[in-house]
Image: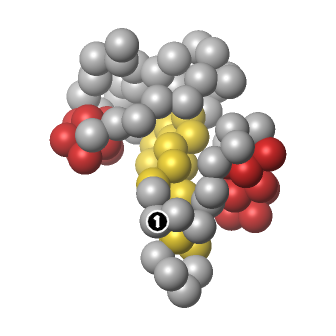
Amino acid sequence: MRQGIDSLAYLVKSQFNLYSFSGQVYLFCGGRKDRFKALYWDGQGFWMLYKRFENGKLTWSNDENEVRALTSEQVDWLMKGFSIRLK
């Protein structure tokens, strides 16, 4: 979770072959699964949101190379600390 905006945008492109300027929200989870970062391009610049849970952890895949599309409802649940079902 030490990477900043530029590093995460590069990771989206180089490792996952996705376009970080697409207007999609990209979520990244820390190793302890108690925090995550969200990266979003709004057309003029990047936004980065950082959230750390004081109690509990996220239900998150252990595969660092896995990319999943989430619904807006699933993202909302994650930000509130609820588990989501990952297929």
Image-quadrant location for residue 45: bottom right
Q: Quadrant of the C terminus?
A: top left
How is the rendered protein coloured?
secondary structure
- At horizontal 46% and vertical 65% (from top left) the residue drawn is 23
The relative height of residue 87 versus residue 37 in the rendered view (above or below) is above
Could you say where residue 56 lies in the image, as x and y percent from the top left? 36, 24
Q: As drawn, which residue projects farthest toward the bottom?
A: 44
**Residue type at numbered disc 1:** Gly
The relative height of residue 21 versus residue 26 in the rendered view (above or below) is below
- 32 displayed left or right of 78: right
Q: Which residue is mark 1?
A: 23
Could you say where residue 34 lies in the image, as x and y percent from the top left? 48, 30
- 66 displayed left or right of 26: right
Image-quadrant location for residue 5: bottom right
- 70 displayed left or right of 24: left
Return the residue nearer the eye: 77 or 33.
77
The relative height of residue 84 versus residue 24 in the rendered view (above or below) is above
Return the residue nearer the eye: 65 or 79.
65
